[in-house]
Image (cartoon, grey):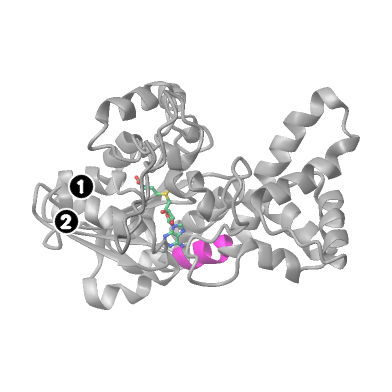
Amino acid sequence: MEEKEVQGAPVHKRRVRYSGTHPKRFEEKYKEQNPEKYADTVEKVIKKGSTPAGMHISICVNEILDFLDIRPGMQGLDATLGYGGHTTEMLKKLEGQGHMYGLDVDPIEIVKTKARLKERGFDEDILTVKQMNFADIDKLVPETGLFDFVLADLGVSSMQIDNPERGFTYKADGPLDLRLNPEKGISAAERLKQMDMEEIAGMFVENSDEPYAEEIAREIAKRNRKRQYIETTTGLKEVIETTLSFIPEKERKEAVKKSCQRCFQALRIDVNQEFEVLESFLTKLPGILAPGGRAAILTFHSGEDRLVKYYFKEGKKDGLYSDVANDVIRPSAEECQRNPRARSTKMRWAIREGENSHRN
Ligand SMILES: C[S@@+](CC[C@H](N)C(=O)[O-])C[C@H]1O[C@@H](n2cnc3c(N)ncnc32)[C@H](O)[C@@H]1O
């Protein structure tokens, strides 16, 4: 039934309809976005190996908890709060004694996560949530003191990827933004306008080893010259499709998909300066850990893992860490089946030199 406008009254905006059992668009998945209200729907989606819209499934939870060995009374830091899944599990280990700090650069999701955790009973007494880049962790210590355990689960959350407004995916139309903090810096669309062909190609190669970097960069630069700027996610996908049209048809779809994944990742790394902030974090990490303090880091591509491996190894050589992971820890096959987003995860750990007062 059509709703009539009553003079003077605000026009009632209808909620987007849930289109059957398999809604495709993010906005239509309102059942998944309300996990408390529609627990059945959420469980069904997880069982199918998907991540419900507006939610993030935490990776390697048991491996992280096993390693961090959290005891009541400890002070901990989750440098990448996200949905708050890991934080929730770590807080449970504190059994109400001690404190955790949760950081995230994302001003949009952090508000929702803070409210969600408060609803679960984790208020300011036990958890402090701060919008902050983990590159600045040293600034936290004068206020907080040192940490007995630290977790960093790098990259983006499913909520960020799934929201077309954030521009993280080529699978849905949206502005080509890709900033973790859209209030700072410039969007990926702006970055593409700024760079010349060589810079764009270099960015695709250095950040994601894109094999068609030159060809794609040439097409972007050509459009820039004609002022046909790439403003949207599907706009960039179309450029990649056009560039790769020389690939035989039966291989093209897969090639376009892979190049889209790599180019979006490269742009995300670029606009968020992900390598630079990770290096800053890794340099400062020993200085924020208490004696015997433990740190675990989850990475999602080889560039990140190389950095973590290097800084942990050097830290051990310099006597800052008493021990570091020799090999990466991977999520189990069962976890990868349950959550395909876990497939590329690698975990590394380090233990700060000295005795931890809570573990004696
Ligand atoms: C994979 S998610 C974390 C998910 C979380 N562990 C959970 O269980 O819900 C990564 C999060 O880190 C945040 N992030 C990425 N880089 C950051 C940085 N330099 N400083 C602070 N937060 C960052 C992202 O905004 C995102 O929310």
Residue located 48% across and 48% down the image? 163
Magenta includes 276?
yes
85 w.r.t. 225: above or below: above
Q: Position of residue 73 (x, y in %)?
A: 11, 55
Dominant secondary-structure state across the stretch colored magenta: helix
Q: Which quadrant of the view contains residue 85?
A: top left
Report the residue marked by disc 2.
74
Give the quarter of the figure containing the N terminus.
top left
Q: Position of residue 84 (x, y in %)?
A: 30, 49
Q: Which quarter is ligand 1 in?
A: bottom left
40 w.r.t. 314: above or below: above
Report the residue marked by disc 1.
70
Q: Visible in this render: residue 25?
A: yes
The boundaries of the magenta stretch are 273-281
Q: Position of residue 293 (x, y in %)?
A: 28, 57
The local secondary structure at tag 2 comes to loop
Is 345 situated left or right of 302 in this image?
A: left
Q: Observer-nearest residue: 197 or 66?
A: 197
Q: Position of residue 352 (x, y in %)?
A: 33, 58
Which residue of the protein is positioned furthest toward the front in this rendering? 7
> Amino acid type of disc 2?
Met
- Disc 2 crowd rating (10 Å Cα; few below 14, some 14-19, many 20+) is many
Task: Check contact, mark 1 vs mark 2: CB within 8 A.
Answer: yes
Residue located 51% across and 72% down the image? 184
Q: CA distance from mark 1 to mark 2?
A: 7 Å
